[in-house]
Image (cartoon, rainbow, N blue to C red):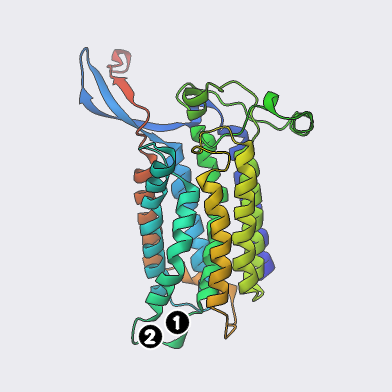
Amino acid sequence: MDELFIFSLTVFLSVFLTWGFTHLTAEHWQFMAAVPVKKMENNVWAGFNLTYYGFFSATAYVLATAVLCILLGAVFVAPKFLLILAVCILGFCVPASRLIARFVEKKKYTFSVQGASFAGLLIAPWVIVLINRFPAAPAHQHPEVIVVLAAIATAFALGEGIGRLSCISFGCCYGKPLKQMSPLFQIVFSHLYFVFYGKTKKIAYADGLDGSRIIPIQAITSIVLCVTGMAGIYLFLKGFFMTAFVGVVTATQIWRFLSEFIRADYRGGGKISAYQIMGFASIVYALAIAWLFPITTHPGHNILNGLKSIWNPAMILFFQGLWMATFFYTGRSRVTGATLSFTVLRENI
């Protein structure tokens, strides 16, 4: 059952990501809808845009949270613990993604996945310790800190990998132009590149690189993180919790450091960005947490129990609410606007 679960998730991710890589650079995959809010002159309305960035971000958050709940449910962590943990972590990380980006990049209306990752890793162990101190809970409601952290790190790697589709859609987090790379890079990526279209995509208004051949860093990052996440799931289900936690954090943050060198979007000042520093700090912090909270007991697992843990009305409603909240928080564009006009089709009256 473990292998069947991993295989099924791998097939889903392969199809989903392949579709995203081949479609989302197109201009019409940036905006889902425009909502009129204020009437101007000549029957023209000003409005705001709802983006596919928000759609894919919300989908990534929900899928990552679902994987987290499945993994912890598989080791018989109570649903109540799962809900409290998810609300605490997400309630901190989602706003932190904007606040950290504002601090580093000096931009008011942007998000940072690395900022959310770093903030989540900082608080997660102590949130787990705090929840475990709640009274009147059976033993299985007090899981080992490293077990929970292994599930969180694995789920986050998958979530960020899926969430890179939102970056492709909005044209952010983009790579350097192929023509600026070394001959080796130009040979390797001679047929593997992105070309973004649309003047409202970030790559266009920030650097004027729309229409250029770009290193597909979002796709590469998505593949690296999803493969790391799938490896983390396998290690978790086989009981290697410490390896899953430290290994996933180390792999994702090393890739974060390396990938920054082939990105062209602004990442703050200096040759080494603040996000790269956060990456290495995350590895050191993860090693410290692993030393501070050693595993004393190894719980058994049953993946079917994990799947059953998300198949109940409370969890389904929670996922729906999480998707809607995340979509409207990340999907309403603050850097683009809309003008709309309406007319009557008299031939249809």
Point out residue 336 in the picture as x, y percentages from the top left corner: 37, 28
Query: Residue 198 in the image: x percent, y percent?
Result: 50, 22
From this viewpoint, is residue 218 visible? Answer: yes
Label at residue 137? 2
Which residue is disc 1 drawn over? 142
Instruction: Please state which of residues 4 and 212 is positioned toward the viewer in this rendering.
Output: 212
Mark number, residue 152: none
Quadrant location of residue 81?
bottom left
Say which amino acid is labelled 1.
His
Query: Is 6 placed above or below 41 here?
Result: below
Q: Quadrant of residue 296?
A: bottom right
Quadrant where the C terminus is found in the figure: top left
Tell me which corner region of the image, top left, top right, bottom left or bottom right, holds residue 215. top right
| Residue drawn at 37 percent across, 58 percent down | 92
The amino acid on which the numbered mark 2 sits, given as a three-letter code, is Ala
Give the residue displayed 29% in from the left and 27% down from the top.
47
Q: Are marks 2 and 1 in contact (CB under 8 Å)?
A: yes
- Which element type, helix, strand or loop, lies under badge 2? loop
Dot 2 or dot 1, earlier in sequence:
2
